[in-house]
Image (cartoon, rainbow, N blue to C red):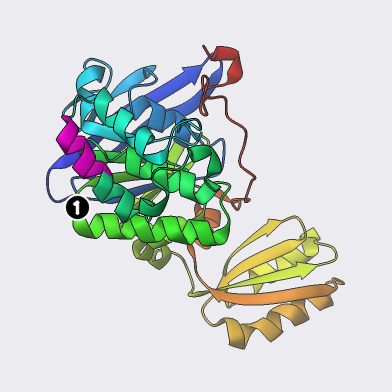
Amino acid sequence: MQGNKAIEVSGLTKTFGTLTAVDNVSFDVSEGEFFGFLGPNGAGKTTLIRILTTLLKPTSGGAVVACCDVARHPERVRHEIGVVPQAMTSDLDLTGYENMDIYGRFYGMPAKERKERTGYLLDLVGLTQRANDLVAAYSGGMRRRLEIARGLVHRPKILFLDEPTIGLDPQSRQNIWGFLKKLMEGDRMTVFLTTHYMEEAEELCGRIAIIDSGKIVVIGSPEELKGRLPGNDSIVLTVDNITQDLIAKVEKLPFVHKSSVEENKIRVSVDSGANNLPGLIDEARSSGAKVLSASIHEQSLEDVFIHYTGKSIREEEAKKVSFLVGAGIPRKWGR
């Protein structure tokens, strides 16, 4: 990698009793990079981000964030980072401005600097007109924008975003993406994002690490990852009954590079989806299956994830997270 390292992780492991939440993870993030961790809920993303932000100590391995080792010098690390957790943590009984101001006070910022920085950030996220309203009156998207702005008050070197758009409607999600893009254009800041939204990772991240069951399975830019896949199109057939005979016949077709099955869907990687779809449907029908639907699309991050893990990421509703325990810690071990 080029440039100085903002984050260096080596052999990081975190266990909770017999559960291994993060399993021997190693990677680097360069200064100024927008880096993403993509994986389903329960993959270990939040546990990892809690270690990197000094809220958890690793079982083994180590990590250097911004300036220091996260286990040996957590106080110094905290001064150099901004964190936006999954759980909404802004105070509902304070105004948007007051939430920002009190956060600046935590970092010892002088009054004049707090005022100027807060005004700038509230304008950046489109909340200037609502700055003096109680946060209890904010929508979910507005509150999330406020929390991202709040994490930037003290000018951190690295901003950690843990599932920043989870539970938001599509329009609010797009608004958050637009703000984050604007942020990256104006400031050379490192951003570390965790998400289970494929589109979000592809829209924002220069590089992505796919994590599953606590392990990193592959790292690269979205285009690099898609370029490693066999074939350039993906066909998905939904059938009434998937049999071993059907799978065997599909895999023997000369134009099929790879196939996977999930419930009543069979997904195949091919070179030319439009040309080969009829042959694939004929093969399914010859095996006694009824084709309910068929779709063709260019290879995507979803296909990358399936290729490396053998399964797809299912969109899940936001889980309720205790403010005190937080995501990423099994409740048995919460404090």
Placement of 324 over or under 144, stated as above or below: above
Position of residue 317 in the picture relative to residue 328 (left or right)? right
Q: In the image, residue 292 lies at what x, y percent?
A: 81, 73
- Mark count: 1
Residue type, numbered disc 1:
Asp
Look at the image and say whether residue 39 sits in the magenta stretch.
Answer: no
- As drawn, the residue found furthest toward the bottom would be 275
Q: Nearer the viewer, residue 6 or 169?
A: 169
Give neighbour class at mark 1: few <14, some 14-19, many 20+ (Cα, 10 Å). Answer: few
Residue at the outermost front position: 132
Look at the image and give the residue range highlighted in magenta.
Answer: 110-118
Q: Is residue 225 visible?
A: no
- The residue at 58%/81% (across/down) is 273
Q: Is residue 36 left or right of residue 42?
A: left
Q: Nearer the viewer, residue 251 or 324?
A: 324
SS at circle 1: loop
Instruction: Measuring from the top left, give residue 20's x and y in whole percent.
Output: 51, 24
Residue 129 sits above or below residue 245 on the image? above
Q: Is residue 116 left or right of 272 when viewed as pictured?
A: left
Q: Quadrant of residue 322?
A: top right
Q: Position of residue 128 (x, y in %)?
A: 35, 52
Please say if 113 is above or below 176: above
- Report if residue 313 is visible in the image: yes
Residue at the disc numbered 1: 187
User: For the point 40% across and 44% down, which residue is it?
Assistant: 146
* Residue 254 placement (x, y as % from top left): 59, 77
**Residue shown at the point (16%, 36%) measured from the top left:** 112
| Residue beneath the point at 39% across and 32% down | 49
Whether residue 116 is in magenta: the answer is yes
User: What is the chief secondary structure element of the magenta stretch?
Assistant: helix
Q: Residue furthest left?
A: 3
